[in-house]
Image (cartoon, grey):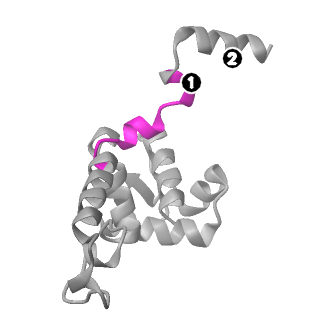
């Protein structure tokens, strides 16, 4: 669901000027309407989207795309980012936690993942793929499509 969430939020980032409905978003992203509705509710609860009711209602992005990170999106959909159960164990841990020789390493890996996701903004994700390529590559792509 997190990958669908990123797709949906990228759609918002590319069309920040107006409200849109769940049906319009499903059409624009080719995601199933029930999935879109579920994600919209999660993003609204997380403060990433504003929900507007009524005949002219819909959803609008709540913050500038540069202020929303991929970590924010993933956390809104999946909860706290954790590669293993011991990362978020709030009193509940795996059976071998006390003896686990890799627990500290999992924390290090998880922290690196969270840092990486925190350093990619929704604005970054909304940029067209070819925008970050060197000019020669963009020219070659343009020539190849002619």
The quadrant where residue 107 appears: bottom left
Answer with mark 2 or mark 1, whichever residue precedes in sequence. 1
The quadrant where residue 65 appears: top left
Q: Quadrant of the C terminus?
A: top right
Mark 2 lies on residue: 141
- In this rendering, the count of numbered labels is 2
Residue drawn at 47 percent across, 32 percent down:
127
The answer to which of 87 and 122 lies nearer the viewer is 87
Q: Position of residue 113 (x, y in %)?
A: 33, 53
Q: Position of residue 94 (x, y in %)?
A: 31, 87
Residue 130 included in the magenta stretch of the image: yes
For disc 2, the neighbor class at 10 Å (few under 14, some 14 to 19, many from 20) is few
Distance of mark 2 from mark 1, alpha carbons? 9 Å
Q: Position of residue 61 (x, y in %)?
A: 37, 50
Marks 2 and 1 close (CB-CB < 8 Å): yes
Residue drawn at 28 percent across, 51 percent down:
112
Specify whether 7 is left or right of 77: right
Magenta range: 118-131
**Looking at the image, can residue 48 be seen?**
no
The mark found on residue 130 in the picture is 1
Specify whether 123 is left or right of 138: left
């Amino acid at each position: 669901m997190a990958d669908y969430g990123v797709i949906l939020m990228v759609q918002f980032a590319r069309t920040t000027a107006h409200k849109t409905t769940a049906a319009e978003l499903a059409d624009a992203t080719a995601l199933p309407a029930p999935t879109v509705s579920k994600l919209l509710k999660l993003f609204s609860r997380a403060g990433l989207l504003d929900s507007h009711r009524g005949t002219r209602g819909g959803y609008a992005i709540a913050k500038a795309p540069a202020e929303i990170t991929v970590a924010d999106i993933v956390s809104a959909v999946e909860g706290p980012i954790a590669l293993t159960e011991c990362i978020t164990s709030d009193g509940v841990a795996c059976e071998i936690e006390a003896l686990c020789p890799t627990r500290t390493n999992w924390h290090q890996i998880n922290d690196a993942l969270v840092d990486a996701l925190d350093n990619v903004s929704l604005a970054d994700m909304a940029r067209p793929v070819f925008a970050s390529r060197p000019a020669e590559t963009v020219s070659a792509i343009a020539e190849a499509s002619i």
